[in-house]
Image: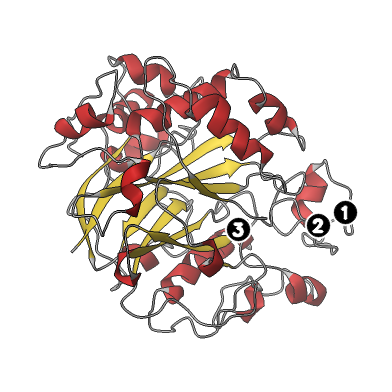
């Protein structure tokens, strides 16, 4: 996506693609999902949509009617970009999948403010660690807190959350997801990662024995873009903990680093992923030569912010990935950094690549949401949905003081086999 590319409502898929420099693509339809391996590009995307709520069941209540304004904004953002395969972070999990069904029916299937409806016949969601009681005193402050509904409970949960499933994940797809071949790593223990950077002396022996690495979960979802094994792209999705909200021990920064490292080892590296075991007990990483796209709010900027040891570079510099010549970008990110000032003025990274509008005193706007394709995939076009203030769609992002949708932006990458 060119830095200067404007957004023009109504943002139909065909009109949008016509405006992408160098892109010669056609629209994606569910009917096309069963065709042979596509020669055109497929749009992968990630969006931390902030569809999380403070109490269990509140998201289901909000989505039960079609008039929740934040959910409408989330749906419109998705409709304007029209991804083929989409990860939504911070979407509260419920065991019955009710919230997902309601969002699909009441919001995405309804055109929002002139945008066209979008339908995803395939979806995947599963339990996450956020808000799941560990049964031990993880933060070493007040004994094990096992009653949901408080910060103290969240601190002792496997992943911070006031109730089980808060800040969950969901994947929506226009292409079939091979659910039987899906792998999840919710229960992998941090101590079982060789050479981990768990802070020395912070956790008790009891805590170290049970602490899971993933603050939400890590999922490997094989997406079938056509017939045959050669058409499969593994969608590797996660949402590592923010590298902050801790102390000098940097427990969250270190955990964020190793959550990102899990994918670096899984796709092959110096250490390799032979030590990994998924929730079914199957060991090992991704088979050699498999195509993949890593996506998520990874809470790590390659230059700025509070990351431990430049955590995201474990993926951006990985030999198994094939980065586009220019990262996903927007003009809105540049404008926001200039107008908001503060910490943004001292950043090393290019504001055009920012994906989140954070506090301007600290840490400033950052590039923390990533869509990273592998070798064997050709990047065609990409972008960050961040309209500038003179664009009618600016109402979906706001200027930072008011958050109409989310403090994160939808990030997308078009790829094709090659």
Answer whether labels 1 and 2 touch (C-beta < 8 Å). Answer: yes
Q: CA distance from mark 1 to mark 2?
A: 8 Å
Q: Secondary structure at mark 1?
A: loop
Q: Earlier in the sequence, mark 1 or mark 2?
A: 2
Q: CA distance from mark 3 to mark 2?
A: 18 Å
Q: Quadrant of the C terminus?
A: bottom left
Taking the image as shown, residue 315 lies to the left or right of residue 64, namely left
Please state which of the two labelled residues, at mark 3 or mark 1, is closer to the viewer: 1
Q: Secondary structure at mark 3?
A: helix
Label at residue 145? 1
Percent x, y of residue 415: 25, 53
Taking the image as shown, residue 319 lies to the left or right of residue 366, namely left
Q: Quadrant of the N terminus?
A: top left
Could you tell me if residue 95 is visible in this image? yes
Of 289 and 269, the residue lying toward us? 289
Q: Secondary structure at mark 2?
A: loop
- Residue corresponding to mark 2: 133
Q: How many marks?
A: 3
Of 360 and 174, the residue lying toward us? 174
């Amino acid at each position: 996506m060119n830095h200067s590319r404007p957004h023009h409502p109504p943002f139909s898929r065909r009109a949008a693609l016509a405006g992408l420099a160098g892109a010669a693509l056609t629209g994606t339809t569910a009917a096309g999902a069963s065709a042979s391996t596509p020669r055109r590009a497929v749009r992968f995307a990630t969006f931390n949509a902030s569809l999380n709520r403070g109490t269990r069941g509140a998201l289901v209540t909000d989505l039960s009617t079609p008039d929740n304004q934040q959910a409408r904004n989330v749906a419109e953002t998705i409709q304007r970009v029209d991804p083929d395969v989409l990860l939504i972070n911070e979407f509260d999990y419920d065991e019955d999948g009710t919230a997902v069904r309601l969002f699909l029916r009441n919001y995405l299937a309804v055109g929002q403010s002139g945008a066209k409806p979008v339908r995803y016949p395939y979806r995947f969601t599963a339990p996450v660690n956020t808000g799941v009681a560990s049964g031990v005193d993880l933060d070493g402050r007040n004994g094990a807190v096992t009653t949901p509904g408080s910060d103290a409970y969240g601190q002792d949960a496997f992943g911070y959350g006031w109730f089980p499933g808060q800040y969950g994940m969901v994947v929506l797809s226009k292409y079939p997801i091979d659910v039987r071949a899906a792998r999840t790593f919710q229960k992998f223990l941090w101590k079982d990662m060789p050479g981990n950077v768990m802070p020395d002396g912070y956790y008790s022996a009891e805590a170290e024995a049970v602490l899971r690495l993933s603050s939400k979960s890590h999922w490997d979802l094989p997406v079938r873009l056509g017939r045959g094994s050669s058409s499969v792209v593994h969608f590797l999705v996660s949402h590592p903990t923010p590298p902050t909200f801790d102390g000098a021990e940097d427990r969250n920064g270190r955990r964020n680093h190793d959550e990102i490292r899990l994918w670096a080892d899984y796709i092959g590296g110096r250490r390799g992923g032979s030590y990994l075991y998924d929730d079914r007990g199957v060991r090992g990483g991704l088979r050699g030569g498999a195509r993949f796209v890593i996506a998520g709010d990874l809470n790590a900027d390659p230059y700025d912010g509070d990351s431990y040891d430049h955590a995201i570079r474990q993926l951006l510099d990985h030999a198994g990935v094939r980065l586009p010549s220019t990262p996903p970008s927007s003009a809105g990110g540049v404008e926001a950094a200039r107008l908001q000032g503060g910490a943004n003025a001292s950043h090393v990274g290019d504001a055009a690549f920012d994906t989140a509008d954070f506090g301007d005193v600290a840490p400033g706007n950052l590039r923390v949401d990533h869509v990273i394709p592998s070798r064997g995939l050709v990047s065609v076009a990409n972008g960050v949905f961040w309209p500038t203030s003179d664009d009618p769609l600016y109402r979906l992002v706001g200027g930072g003081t008011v958050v109409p949708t989310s403090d994160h932006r939808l990030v997308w990458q078009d790829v094709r086999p090659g």
